[in-house]
Image (cartoon, rainbow, N blue to C red):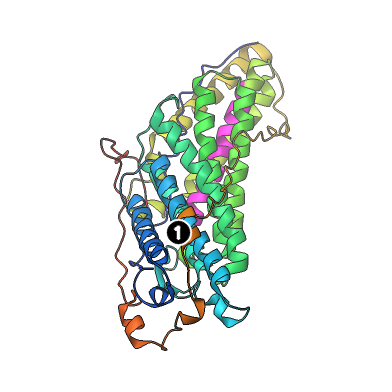
Amino acid sequence: GRHLAPARLSTMSSIWVFRLPQKATAPASFAQGRLAVGASNQEARNVLKEATDARKAAIDALSTGSTLEQALAAVNTYVGHLLALQSAGQAGAAQPGPALGRMQTAVTFKWADSVAGAINAFTSVDEELANVLLAFAVWCTRRSAALPFSSNGDDPATKEAYHCLRRASGLFDYVVELRRRAVSHHPGTDFDERVLKSLSAQALAEAQEITLERARQKGNAPDLIAQIAADTQAKFEAAEASVKDIPAMLAVYRTYLAFKKSFYKAFSQHYQGMYLFAQDKCGDAIKVFTLARESLDKAAKDSQGFATAMRCRPLTQHTVYTNLDTVLKKALEKANHENGFIYHQRVPADAPAPAEPKAIVQVEPYVLPAPAVSWSAAKFEVEKVPLRGQNTAADLASTDNAPVAKTEVPAAAGLRPQEEQLCVVS
């Protein structure tokens, strides 16, 4: 068969991305206030300080240029303390009853909502667990975007970006399940299941973008690349469908997802056309290239308004878009030219069946760590833990009124984000 020159297309997720702002939180202390009243031995007082320090370390890890491995270790250490606190509250109660929940609800945790922008106060350990894991998920997506672009996908930074996105998808999925039993449903917020499911699908789609680029760089067959691109399109489509009824606050996000959906449809069709042309099916190739042109034009339409809202160059001016635009024009011109001189095939009215989607990337599920072992010797008198308003001194010593500060996540030391290309909401 005859061949078209391989397209020089780059599909890494750091080219144009939409990211939620990093979740911000107020300081919270387990060692001061109501919980400390119930600590009945030195080991209990020690673990409350350890839990406080672990929370600060986890938040710091999500506020600096930590690696994925460092952030995961810090978050899991803190989560281990939260799980131990839950168990300690149950073991420390003299008898079943209202006192069982006193330890789990003694500390106030304030978090900013990345979607709605509001500051919310949470008073249960499960709610804190949901918030810190969601903050970690958002951090993973932002970390992936801050890592430098690679053309071959085999360098450490690109591999970390890939694992960040798979990890983020698993975290979003875990928070969905946790939300169902621990956090009230509030539409249009961080804990709207539609938003969480969309973010999970987006992260997985972007991880597959990295795989797609590696497949292209390694010279995999055009039909395989078309299949991977078709699945990437389907993932972005699923992400878009999940938030189609969310209020206008996510309009820019939907625009981003619509653009990527149409772009990867065009990408898949382009490679399917290359495959058909190589099989001497020139008429079919012309039809598919023509459809790819229509899909790419729709991507341009879908992206309108995105650049203004995101304060970045229009998506249609990025190299990824212009490269596909250029190679698609050349491919269609070449196919038409050779059909007129060599093949003389009829261009069918109906297009060949699209490439069958082929999923390559899987979610990396989040698994809870073991409860912190340092709590095993701690003793608490749960009935002595005061409720809010019952002990003025304990209330005043708590961190109930600590303010929430905006959290910034810089690029890792020595790594520069793709400033010309990166579009991030923050």
- How many other residues sit within 10 Å of disc 1, few (<14), some (14-19) or many (≥20)? many
Q: Which of 347 and 54 is in front in this view?
A: 54
Query: Is label 1 in a helix, a strand or a loop?
Result: helix
Question: Residue at image x 38%, y 73%?
Answer: 36
Quadrant containing the C terminus in the rendered view: bottom left
Question: Residue at image x 46%, y 42%?
Answer: 164
Q: Along the horizontal axis of the image, is 149 left or right of 172?
A: left
Q: Nearer the viewer, residue 405 or 267?
A: 405
Quadrant containing the N terminus in the rendered view: top right
- When the figure is inspected, residue 287 is found, relative to residue 21, above or below; the finding is above
Q: Quadrant of residue 158?
A: top left
- When the figure is inspected, residue 290 is found, relative to residue 50, above or below; the finding is above
The residue stretch that appears in magenta? 251-274
- When the figure is inspected, residue 263 is found, relative to residue 56, above or below; the finding is above
- Please say whether residue 224 is one of the residues in the magenta stretch: no
Residue 192 location (% of width, % of height): 55, 65
- Please say whether residue 259 is one of the residues in the magenta stretch: yes
Whether residue 271 appears in this view of the structure is yes
Q: Quadrant of residue 2?
A: top right
Q: Along the horizontal axis of the image, is 372 left or right of 351?
A: left
The residue wearing badge 1 is: 132
Q: Which of 195 and 224 is in front in this view?
A: 195
Whether residue 298 appears in this view of the structure is no
Residue 75 location (% of width, % of height): 43, 52
Question: Residue at image x 55%, y 38%?
Answer: 264
Residue 216 location (% of width, % of height): 52, 24
